[in-house]
Image (cartoon, rainbow, N blue to C red):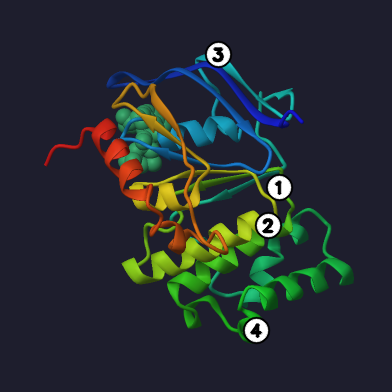
Amino acid sequence: MAQKKIVEIKDLGITYYTLEGETEALKSIDLHIYDNEIIGIVGPSGCGKSTLLSMISGLIQPTRGEIRVKDELVDGPLKNIGYMFQNDQLFEWRNILSNVVIGLEIQGKLDENSMNIAKDMLKAYGLGDFMYSYPHQLSGGMRQRAALIRTLLLEPDLLLLDEPFSALDYQTRLAISDEIGLILKEEKKTAIMVTHDIAEAISLCDRVVILSGRPGTIKEIIDIELTCEGERSPIKCREAPEFRHYFNRIWKELDIHV
Ligand SMILES: Nc1ncnc2c1ncn2[C@@H]1O[C@H](COP(=O)(O)OP(=O)(O)OP(=O)(O)O)[C@@H](O)[C@H]1O
Ligand SMILES: [Mg+2]
């Protein structure tokens, strides 16, 4: 069976015009993303990764080329998209439960049924005892998990994750990226994740897109196939025999100089 395309990007490019001059941020991007795929985007700072997500969400318009999400041309902000950033953007004055249902509330979809789904999801993902706590009472990883649940409750067709774990310390980051990877697979989500962390991209993603320095172009798209015994958890994937090979390949392509 042919896989369903969720995102189709054709010859996409963007140039920012400011008083200081022009910046060509991205050039000639061609990319297809399929249902249930997790795609990683890596590339040097300033190569246009965040810009690419903003264009897919319809928040900014490309200068050249086009993007289709579920066959529809993106020409304005899309509704059915979940966007997660480095900062979890939880509201400090709302408890966790009322934070995770805020999107439903705004869309007028909050009722007893959706409230129960929210509670079940908080319980399923380890926040059952913290529903009535406030964000400052949670660890960074728990906050990020709450932010993901808030995003998932809106049942987005596509999740855009812009370095969602980069504000966390290393250990929390490992644990939460593992959990979030499993949640995304369990909920059968399609996601595009920007990350600076090569290991995170390999362990979490089905494919990794490597962008060149600005103007960002696609240098290579790598299919990740790891042999993991038992459950394919991102942490276990790091022990797969192929892991190091992918790491070295991406590292070389990124051509990082220190
Ligand atoms: N609103 C804007 N106006 C003008 N230039 C912009 C704007 N947003 C981004 N740029 C420029 O476009 C380029 C790409 O920016 P972008 O934020 O997409 O990069 P990035 O790959 O996400 O970087 P990082 O890894 O540091 O997050 C940069 O040179 C940036 O200065
Ligand atoms: Mg960015």
Q: Secondary structure at mark 1?
A: loop
Q: Residue at x 45, y 57 (%)?
A: 237
Counting every numbered tag in the picture gives: 4
Return the residue nearer the eye: 42 or 168: 42
Q: Are marks 2 and 1 in contact (CB under 8 Å)?
A: yes
Res 146 → quadrant: bottom right
> Disc 4 beta carbon < 8 A from ligand 2?
no
- Determine crowd level at label 4: few under 14, some 14-19, many 20+ residues with C-alpha closer than 10 A: some
Q: Residue at x 77, y 31 (%)?
A: 1
Q: Position of residue 36 (x, y in %)?
A: 66, 44
Sequence-wise, the earlier of marks 4 and 3 is: 3
Sequence-wise, the earlier of marks 4 and 2 is: 4
Q: Position of residue 254 (x, y in %)?
A: 27, 34
79 sits to left or right of 193 = right
The residue that mark 2 highlights is: 152
Res 149 → quadrant: bottom right
The residue that mark 3 highlights is: 65
Mark on residue 132?
4
The residue that mark 1 highlights is: 156
Q: CA distance from mark 3 to mark 2?
A: 30 Å
Q: Position of residue 137 (x, y in %)?
A: 49, 83
Going by the picture, which residue comes out furthest to the right? 112
Q: Residue at x 21, y 32 (%)?
A: 255
Residue type, label 1: Pro
Task: Give the number of the mark in front: 4 or 3.
Answer: 3
Q: CA distance from mark 4 to mark 2?
A: 19 Å
Task: Give the number of the mark in front: 4 or 1.
Answer: 1
Q: Position of residue 152 (x, y in %)?
A: 68, 57
> Disc 1 beta carbon < 8 A from ligand 2?
no
Q: CA distance from mark 4 to mark 1?
A: 25 Å
Residue type, label 2: Leu
